[in-house]
Amino acid sequence: MKRFRTQVGIVGAGPAGLMLGHLLHRQGIDSIILENRSQDYVIERVRAGVLEQGTVDLMNDVGLGTRLNREGLRHDGVYIAFAGARHRIDMAALTGGRGITVYGQNEVVKDLIAARTAANAQLHFGVTDLRVTDIEGPEPRIVFNRNGEPYEIACDFIAGCDGFHGVCRTSIPHELLRTYEREYPFAWLGILADAPPSSDELVYSLHERGFALFSMRSPTVTRLYLQCAPDEQIADWPDERIWSELETRLSTSDGWRPNQGRIVQKGVTPMRSFVAEPMRYRRLFLAGDAAHIVPPTGAKGLNLAVADVCRLSNALAAYYKSGSETLLDQYSDTGLRRTWRAQRFSWWMTSMLHKSDSDNPFDHQRRLADLEYLVSSRAAMTSLAESYVGAPLD
Ligand SMILES: Cc1cc2nc3c(=O)[nH]c(=O)nc-3n(C[C@H](O)[C@H](O)[C@H](O)COP(=O)(O)OP(=O)(O)OC[C@H]3O[C@@H](n4cnc5c(N)ncnc54)[C@H](O)[C@@H]3O)c2cc1C
């Protein structure tokens, strides 16, 4: 068994784990990041793409803004489409100049891995059989195998940044963890296509056949989503069927429609709301999807993960600087408040914009009335805009 020691052991090299490692490094705190997938897999995983204003500001503040500012697409507004018409919500005008930036999660991950490598800090991919142990005591440990050899890392703290299916949350004694969950009776079929975006802002659309989202990743790549069944088989969706359904659900009476192009990636994303509380057990802290999942309609998952680790790194820095545990003690409660706000917004956007098999005509008309109110009331648009661009980081 090879034995090492670090101040903070980080499980998972998604956005949460990598950003935490970067923030800690800037504070002079030692960490080791352990990831069970390969580096290529982690970089190529296509997931979120909308960064809140606070996430962009943080990336700039911590020296990660160069490529983001060059390649990210800043949006001041967003479109809501229904009954054949698109309605623009001017988020920047309604929130004192705040907006969102389209920059793929895999680009964020690429920037963070580059920063970690440049800092010569420890980041290990492809570890297996990882477990956290001794979490009751003052020196929790992470054990795992790497290249067929067993390792053990003794830590002051462990950060569980290992996503919804990770091992950290399930290491917390079951009776001490309360979970809240909602599964939705639909999923998203998402594609990436080599097609220049036909709108320079996102279009969220409710159609009688279901929800669709027009989005983009760059000036030449469009990202599109369709509401589908949770058990949808991607094999049942040849490209022609996908384009036909997207055209039907997204085209508006002013002649706007998505541009078509070669589909380079497709997949089905489940929709779930989930919260685990507390986000801490002794010296084990949960961050990002390990602690909470939001349906992607509100574009909050990645941003919540960043907000968690920003708070956690500040709390750890205060601890190492002065011995104070005040911020560590507040980590869970403060995070849960932000999480529930994001849950409310994501649930509301999802309910307003998706149809369900149990709907009757009343439900569809009520949804249209909701949308009609949204796009005609400055108060309602401000409420959406404030939540969409996100609250400043704690
Ligand atoms: C399939 C999918 C599609 C998504 N699509 C969208 C989208 O379109 N729009 C949107 O806004 N949001 C989307 N999200 C949400 C968003 O991507 C997440 O909120 C975000 O990835 C959270 O980051 P994280 O670092 O907390 O977790 P993750 O990104 O899940 O990172 C966790 C990391 O831990 C690793 N890991 C897990 N178990 C172990 C272990 N035992 N040992 C070591 N490492 C481990 C995983 O391999 C992973 O790299 C999607 C999420 C998923 C799962």
Image (spheres, rainbow, N blue to C red):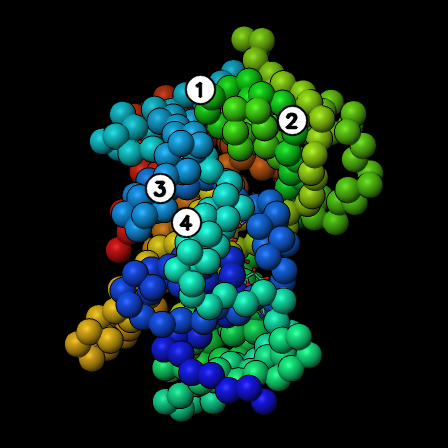
Question: Nearer the observer, disc 3 or disc 2?
Answer: 3
Give the residue at mark 2.
194
Is residue 13 rendered to the left or right of residue 19?
right
Is the residue marked by circle 4 packed among few (<14), some (14-19), or many (20+) residues within 10 Å? many
C-alpha gap between disc 3 and disc 2 = 26 Å
C-alpha gap between disc 4 and disc 2 = 26 Å
Is the residue marked by circle 2 packed among few (<14), some (14-19), or many (20+) residues within 10 Å? some
Q: Which residue is at the front of the view, 191 or 365?
A: 191
Q: Which residue is at the front of the view, 172 or 167?
A: 167
Query: Which of marks 2 and 3 precedes in the sequence?
Result: 3
**Residue 327 picture quarter:** bottom left
Above-or-below relation of 385 to 109: above
Quadrant of the image containing the N terminus: bottom right
| Residue at horizontal 22 percent and vertical 70 percent from the top | 318
| Residue at horizontal 33 percent and vertical 60 percent from the top | 23
User: Tag 2: residue type?
Assistant: Asp
C-alpha gap between disc 2 and disc 1 = 26 Å
Q: Position of residue 44 (x, y in %)?
A: 61, 47
User: Tag 1: residue type?
Assistant: His
Q: Position of residue 191 (x, y in %)?
A: 66, 35
Give the residue at mark 3.
65
